[in-house]
Amino acid sequence: MEIKIGNKTISKSSKPYFIADIAANHDGDINRAYHLIELAKEAGADAAKFQNFKAETIVSKNGFERIGKQISHQSKWKKSVFETYKDASLPDMWSQKLKEKCDNIGIEYMTTPYDFASVDLADQYVNAFKIGSGDITWTEMLEYIAKKGKPVLLATGASELEDVKRAMQVLQNYNNQIILMQCNTNYTASSSNFLYINLNVLGTYQKQYPNCILGLSDHTFGYATVLGAFALGARVFEKHFTDDNNRVGPDHKFSMNPSTWKQMVKACNELYQAMGDGIKKVEKNELDTVSIQRRSFYLQKDLNRGDIIKEEDIFPLRPVKEGSVLPYEKNKILGRRIVNDKKKDESLLWEDIDNVEG
């Protein structure tokens, strides 16, 4: 299975694909959004992602007010939930400009749309759609996006396996270009969140959807989870991105910054190289060490032509010489005769032994 997003092809064996989720970290300033796109590109991101929504089509003002208090990560917000979403929403006119900026510097433009109109708007500019975890049960929206015929990245935070199966069935009715992403939707940046990211779910997804490409949409601090997920088969990684974790805003605290992002990309690409092809063999960079680390039999005393080789006459030592007798071949040579005069501490070669096939 291969999925092409823009000029990048993603497969189960491909290099890691990194999505810098700028999200609300533009802080309402398009020039700041441009700057974050540039920083994401410099830091090694393959895509810069935004979110398209209107406050009134994603949250109920009355619904959140009736809860009585803001909970989870929203408890740190200085404004109400409705006002925070209103501040974070992107003007429609930004989409084309952000797309053009991404194209100009050579990074994929991506967004998560949260209503039908935003899907239609985004469809003009994106090569793939991201679906946020919160919409995994909105089957009508899943169907609407799937019918666009473009690759779909599905985050699966705060959901049961049955939710995932339902969503995947809807998507697969219209589209088989799906990247299934494990996710945990706690955005508090607490170190305890590592207890709940549950990377082994990726193994469950692999068994359930063996032809599906896997990913991780992650909000834990740092990138240990990314390395673990890559080792478990994930190839697409989404992390929030900012230039300053101390800025005021809903997403800054738990975001990666240019420095940590570069470290993540470097470490994950090193891991990609280290994973290899799974075929056990003597690697090219080990060829010299075969001779200097492996053992072959060396004589413990002088032997003359016609002498019979006894166990006490030989001992395995480094290095191994081409054509020499290896330790596991000892029983093939004991009791055989030497055909050449040999000195103590000389390597015993097959050509020195009578009547033995080497």
Image (spheres, grey):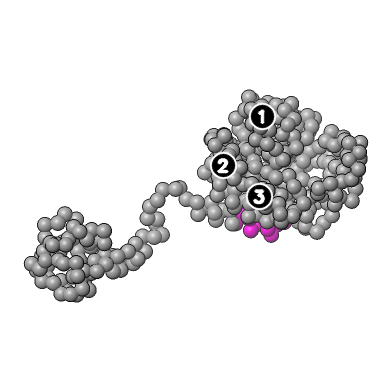
Question: Dot 3, crowdedness within 10 Å: few (<14), some or many (≥20)?
Answer: many
Question: Can you identify the residue that label 3 sits on?
Answer: 45
Q: Amino acid at mark 1?
A: Arg
**Mark nearer the N terminus (3 vs 1):** 3
Quadrant position of residue 224: bottom right
Residue in the picture at 72% in, 40% down: 158
Q: The C terminus lies in which quarter of the figure?
A: bottom left
Eye-nearest disc, 3 or 1: 1
- Relative to 17, is 314 above or below? below
**Amino acid on which disc 3 is placed:** Ala
Instruction: Inspect the magenta stretch and tell me whether residue 264 lies in it.
Output: yes
How far is the residue under mark 3 from the one under mark 2?
26 Å
Disc 3/disc 1 C-alpha distance (Å): 31 Å
Q: Disc 3 vs disc 2: which is toward the camera?
A: 2
Q: Secondary structure at mark 1?
A: helix
Q: Is residue 333 left or right of residue 165?
A: left
Image height of 116 relative to 195, above or below: above
Residue 77 in magenta?
no
Q: Name the residue: 71% across, 54% down.
A: 192
What's the magenta region? 256-266
Q: Is residue 66 at all visible to an observer of this figure?
A: yes
Helix, strand or loop under label 3: loop
| Image coords of residue 88 (percent x, y) | 84, 44
Is the Cβ of the residue at disc 3 closer than 8 Å to that at disc 2? no
Q: Position of residue 189 (x, y in %)?
A: 75, 54
Label at residue 166: 1
- Magenta: main secondary structure equals helix
Residue 203's disc number? 2
Front in this rendered view, residue 298 or 90: 298
Q: Pick out the residue farthest to the top.
A: 173
